[in-house]
Image (tube, helix red, strand yellow):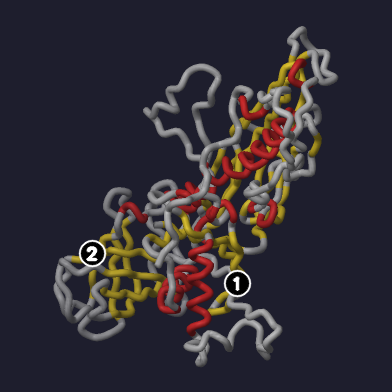
């Protein structure tokens, strides 16, 4: 058996750009002597329809003064190169390895392209897993287009079995010098990764004529933020505000930069043409991505944990998931119980006949702490929950904060891994602006016989340490 497609859920938006006939009473038939019973209060059949709250849970908001936000993130502390090649004959005591140019470090010095130095001891490992060796660097050619390092093996016979087709990985683990010798040649300069993002301007508006503001209806309307009454425009105005609040969050999640040569970049008129780097875009490009079906076994989660070990190894993480992913995690954890076949020994223990059985889990620990939280945005059928292509089932977010240099404060400051920067100065705060124009509803700014409620915000999301995030997608 399965859930049938009919009847389904309604995707038709209730918000329209013009008044609908259904908003007003049209049956003024005084010849009918029978009056129907009416439920005046509007029934909230979809419950709380708003989906925002994610960024409020995991991030913070702080002002910014510029069209461009930049920050620096630390690079790796130790030196490692992969895919190195050599043409040296097997069995030689020395060998010369070519270092891939793409892995060079321009910050080493003006003319030096790799961060290897004479006297450093290294570990060499064949990429095919057949052998590994220890060696000491005896010479380095810092040619910017073809850097090489010559090494002397510690073992007699050198690299006993290899061919020109073999690739080697190497990393530095120390150094060795003879007595009474000079110090290490050259020095290393720290290399930061510089990232940036641009804020985008988000707008919305609600307009109602003065005449419609004076029209009372028979339906008592209500919204999620508590607005109620018999004036229909109250509902529409408040729903516009709620919709705008949701867009403030979803724009930060879904935004993408406009690529060069794209239609968005060439757009004319009043619409924006630069875009911004949202959370999904940033994690998909600089973070970790799990593609395919959800990880449903400990072996698959061990793969996730192994990747986190190679990144920042953040101790605590929150996994925001859709309903299917949440159930997959519950089933996986329940299966670890030796009595899991009965399905009654996990959740609430001492299961009495009057107790509800808790078949869900809030988190688990395996190497790291993982806390599970349902994300309404991924379940809502009018948003991500209704997708088949491009579906996202979860996002792993590291808990805590990281240290970054704050240009406004002029010093290092602790910032959440996810936070929103909004435009603001001493005279203008664009975090959340709302104003009324027209000549109705108390406004006296123009001769327009209407009330227009405007909403505006200018903001960008900063995803610090995207390498610690995990995106789970189809």
Question: Which element type, helix, strand or loop, lies under badge 2?
Answer: strand
State the CA–CA distance, disc 1 to disc 2: 37 Å
Is residue 379 depicted above or below 15 in this figure?
below
Residue drawn at (31%, 74%), measured in percent from left and top? 124
Label 2 Cα neighbours within 10 Å, binned few <14 / some 14-19 / many ≥20: many
- Along the line of sight, the residue nearer the viewer: 272 or 44: 44
Residue at which label 1 appears: 315
- Along the line of sight, the residue nearer the viewer: 192 or 116: 192
> What is the quadrant of the C terminus in the image?
bottom left
Residue at which label 2 appears: 85
Is residue 245 depicted above or below 48 in this figure?
above
- Image-based side of 379 in relation to 108, left or right: right
Marker count (numbered)? 2
- Quarter of the view holding residue 42: top right
Q: Residue furthest top?
A: 447
Residue drawn at (72%, 17%), measured in percent from left and top? 209
Work out whether mark 1 precedes mark 2 in sequence or the reverse, and give the earlier one. Answer: 2
* x and y percentages locating residue 34 in the rendered image: 72, 33
- Along the line of sight, the residue nearer the viewer: 337 or 233: 233
Residue drawn at (43%, 70%), measured in percent from left and top? 295
* x and y percentages locating residue 51 in the rendered image: 62, 49
Q: Residue furthest right?
A: 442
């Amino acid at each position: 058996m399965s859930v049938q497609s009919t009847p389904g859920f309604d995707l038709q938006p209730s918000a329209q750009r013009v008044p609908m006939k259904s908003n007003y009473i049209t049956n003024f038939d005084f010849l009918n002597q029978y009056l129907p019973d009416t439920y005046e209060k509007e029934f909230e059949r979809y419950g709380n329809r708003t989906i925002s709250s994610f960024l409020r849970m995991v991030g913070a908001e702080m002002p910014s003064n510029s069209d461009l936000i930049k920050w620096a993130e630390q690079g790796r502390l130790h030196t490692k190169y992969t895919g190195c090649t050599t043409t040296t004959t097997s069995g030689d005591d020395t060998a010369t390895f070519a270092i891939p140019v793409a892995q060079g470090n321009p910050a080493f010095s003006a003319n030096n392209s790799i961060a290897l130095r004479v006297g450093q001891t290294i570990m060499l490992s064949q990429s095919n897993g057949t052998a590994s060796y220890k060696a000491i660097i005896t010479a380095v050619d810092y040619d910017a287009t073809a850097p090489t390092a010559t090494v002397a093996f510690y073992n007699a016979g050198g690299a006993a079995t290899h061919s020109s087709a073999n690739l080697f990985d190497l990393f530095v683990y120390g150094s060795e010098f003879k007595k009474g010798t000079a110090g290490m040649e050259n020095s290393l300069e720290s290399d930061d990764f510089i990232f940036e993002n641009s804020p985008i301007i988000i707008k919305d508006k609600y307009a109602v004529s003065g005449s419609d503001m004076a029209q009372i209806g028979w339906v008592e309307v209500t919204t999620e933020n508590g607005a109620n009454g018999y004036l229909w425009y109250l509902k529409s105005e408040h729903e516009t505000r709620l919709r705008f609040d949701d867009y403030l969050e979803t724009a930060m999640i879904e935004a993408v930069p406009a690529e060069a040569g794209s239609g968005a970049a060439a757009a004319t008129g009043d619409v924006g043409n630069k875009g911004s780097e949202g959370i999904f875009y940033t994690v998909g490009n600089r973070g970790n991505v799990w593609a395919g079906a959800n990880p449903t076994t400990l072996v698959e989660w061990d793969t996730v944990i192994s990747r986190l070990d190679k990144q920042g190894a953040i101790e605590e993480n929150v996994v925001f998931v859709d309903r299917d992913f949440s159930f997959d995690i519950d089933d996986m954890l329940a299966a670890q119980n030796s009595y899991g076949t009965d399905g009654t020994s996990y959740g609430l223990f001492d299961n009495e006949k009057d107790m509800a059985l808790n078949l869900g889990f809030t988190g688990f620990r395996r190497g790291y702490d993982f806390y599970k939280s349902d994300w309404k945005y991924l379940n809502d059928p009018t948003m991500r929950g209704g997708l088949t292509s491009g579906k996202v089932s979860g996002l792993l977010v590291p808990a805590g904060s990281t240290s970054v240099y704050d240009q406004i404060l002029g010093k290092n400051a602790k910032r959440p891994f996810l936070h929103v920067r909004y435009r603001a100065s001493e005279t203008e705060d664009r975090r959340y602006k709302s104003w009324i124009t027209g000549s109705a509803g108390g406004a006296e700014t123009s001769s327009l016989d209407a009330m227009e409620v405007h909403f505006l915000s200018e903001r960008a999301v900063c995803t610090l340490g995207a390498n610690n995030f995990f995106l789970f997608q189809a």
